[in-house]
Image (tube, rainbow, N blue to C red):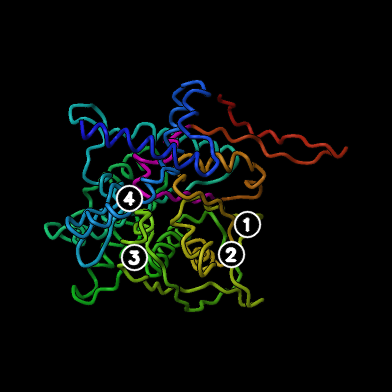
Amino acid sequence: MCFLLIIGAVGIAQAILEVSEGDRPQVADLFTRVPTATNLRSFERDLETSCWFSKTLRPVMQDLRFRLLWDVGDKAVLGRQGWWFYKPDVRYLVEPPEPQDSPGSGYGPVISAIVGFRDRLAQRGIHLLVVPAPGKPGIYPDRLSHRAAPTAYSGRGPTHRLISELRQAGVEVVDLFEPFLRARAGGSHDYEMPYYLARDTHWNGNGVRLAAQVIAARVRQLGWVPPGSVKYDLKPVSVRRRGDVLRMLDNPRIAERFPTEEAFCTQVIRCDSGQPYRDDPNASVLVLGDSFLRIYERDEPGSAGLIAHLAWELGQPLASIVNDGGASTLVRRQLADRPNLLGGKKLVIWEFVERDIRFGAEGWKDVFLPDPVRPSAHGTTQTEPSGASRQP
């Protein structure tokens, strides 16, 4: 009875607070809107964000649980030596992608979407290079658990199986995992140079440069894009970041216990103008990806991320589309909304973090690429046929 009274008192007290502030009680929405699944989900989200008890008591309880039990919530995993990990990154590595008795690898939709995208680009004379970005626990399993060796992921992770199956399907894939693990093994165990941020999901400036070098080397080896002639220089800079894993807790009480982390980067500067790197929509290379492209590039300090460093390595500016958390499907939908961006392209580099293989927003959908639109002689627009099959 006491438990039920406490639960009932929360709703009553919330309604009284809303009325006292001149607002209509939110619970009234239950009786003024059709109780569909969408409306009920919307009501639940609104209630969670506006509830006084949730906003006031939850941070206190989270802080108490962190102090007593080192509980960091449902989005984070507390590692060793001050490292934090994003829980979906860990789940991707340790949970089986399908029931053990199911046939196949479970990558059917992923492979189908990638192969279909490659074929649609090929019909336009454009090559595709796929780049799965390693999640932090795959490169630093020993910072997650003392039972894991630094090379525990080498050759045995789920992404390696996907890379193998994509190559069997004729898709060109860059394997970043082996270069990162070799780079870790090349340093002293006590003084090794980190390639990822300690309380963030992303790589640091060292990781950006290493990834750009490996990808650019493969592009040059394939010979799909002629060498560029634009000269760039590198300018060392540093920024202080509050790790995104800490921000996901949405609890300043916990986040403020940890100092911001200094990230050393190199900003890419054009030698002819002295200006930071900028994309060129008319470039011959288009880069698609997620926040692993965005970090340092479109947030502070700018022009210091993977896109800029690829431009420096290749000697030419690039075009790009970036969608945080949406590199599996949403970034291709953005491209489908801008088909003219494919004009003059010879290569599309498609980056996505490995956890999106299972947890990407919208999954792995087949996305139709419409024909580019060009102006006609009469001032109207018309499509340029590409021979692509029009699938619904």
Which residue corresponds to the image point at 23% horizontal and 51% vertical from the top-left? 155
96 left or right of 318 in image: left
Q: Nearer the viewer, mark 3 or mark 4?
A: 4
Q: Position of residue 141 (x, y in %)?
A: 21, 57
The residue labelled by disc 2 is 316
228 vs 325, nearest the viewer = 325
Q: Position of residue 286 (x, y in %)?
A: 56, 52
**Does residue 11 appear anywhere in the picture?**
yes
Which residue corresponds to the image point at 46% horizontal and 51% vertical from the top-left? 290
**Does residue 114 appear anywhere in the picture?**
no
Separation of disc 2 and disc 1 at Cα? 8 Å
Q: Amino acid at mark 4?
A: Leu
Question: Label 4's element?
Answer: helix
The numbered dot on residue 388 is none
Separation of disc 3 and disc 1 at Cα? 31 Å
Q: Amino acid at mark 1?
A: Ala
Q: Position of residue 19 (x, y in %)?
A: 50, 39
- Is 144 located above or below residue 336 in the figure? below
The residue labelled by disc 3 is 197
The residue labelled by disc 1 is 283
Q: Are marks 2 and 1 in contact (CB under 8 Å)?
A: yes
254 vs 20, nearest the viewer = 20
Q: Which of the marked residues, 4 or 2, is nearer the chain's N terminus?
A: 4
Q: Amino acid at mark 2?
A: Gln
- In the rendered view of the protein, which quadrant contains the N terminus? top left
Q: Point out the stretch of residues depicted in magenta.
A: 347-365
140 left or right of 363 in image: left
The residue labelled by disc 4 is 57
Q: Nearer the viewer, mark 4 or mark 2?
A: 4
Question: Label 1's element?
Answer: loop
> Total of numbered circles in the picture?
4
- For label 4, the crowd category at 10 Å Cα-Cα, with few meaning under 14, some 14 to 19 and many 20 or more, is few
